[in-house]
Amino acid sequence: MGGIQTDSSTDESTGNRVKNDLHVHIVDDDASVRESLKALIRAAGYGVTCYASGKSLIDHIDTVSGCVIVDLRLADMDGLVVQRTLIQEQVDADVIIMSAYGDIAHAVEAMRLGAVDFVEKPFDPETLIDRLATLEKASDDATRLQRDARQRAALIDTLTPREKQVLSGIVDGQANKEVAAALGISARTVETHRVHIMQKLQANSLAHLVRIWIEATAHHEQALDTD
């Protein structure tokens, strides 16, 4: 497959056998970085798949799970675009953002979207492997729930201000006509917003929509408490 390199159960060049459950996906347009990361991570016993572009990973997103290590400044797209796509598609993968630049603004944005780490190149190999080991051990239910809540909050952030107003009315139990009256718009417009909200939040029912809102709100309140 073009732009993708996937390991087998045993690394033919070193004899390193894949012994850990976590699979790592590396996205970097620099071949030397991909190769050095692949060798390092394979040697630690993890399965590895490499992608030369963000598009290559997204084209095969159905096969992605585990951990995604993505460069912030890819040739074809921003690494944050890759991260947002993983969130929107509800991919079960932790994200580590890499950058050769000390870009605090992007680091904050990546962490807000749910990235588990932001590492600067050149990175310390031991630190990276320790981080992968921590991720593998932290796959318990509580950690998954926390990450899911971060993803829900990130999806809420994709809504327009008006959509957020409509959503607030919906989760308060208001009918479309009540929401419309409160916002000074038509009930038909409220219904249109409601359809868009359901699509953006990937909700399949009103109950699901309310649950997403509750999880996202709880995550937001928890984040404020820890600031």
Image (spheres, grey):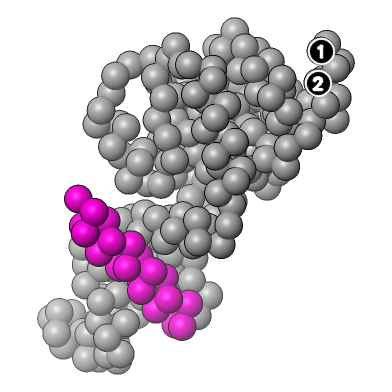
Image coordinates of residue 89 in percent, x first then y, are 54, 53
Q: Within 10 angstroms of label 1, few (less than 14), some, or many (20 or more) residues?
A: few
Which stretch is magenta?
A: 206-227
Q: CA distance from mark 2 to mark 1?
A: 5 Å
Q: Amino acid at mark 1?
A: Thr
Q: Are marks 2 and 1 in contact (CB under 8 Å)?
A: yes
Dot 1 falls on a residue whose secondary structure is loop
Q: Is residue 161 left or right of residue 59?
A: left
To which quarter of the image does residue 14 belong? top right
Q: Within 10 angstroms of label 2, few (less than 14), some, or many (20 or more) residues?
A: some
Q: Which residue is mark 1?
A: 14
Which of the labelled discs sits on residue 16, or is there none? 2
Image coordinates of residue 3 in percent, x first then y, are 68, 22
Q: Is residue 64 left or right of residue 186?
A: right
To which quarter of the image does residue 93 belong? top right
Q: Is residue 215 magenta?
A: yes
- Between 41 and 95, the one lying in front of the other is 41
Quadrant where the N terminus sits is: top right
Residue 35 versus residue 216 in the image, above or below: above
Residue at image coords 36%, 38%: 110
Dot 2 falls on a residue whose secondary structure is loop
Q: Is residue 220 left or right of residue 146?
A: left
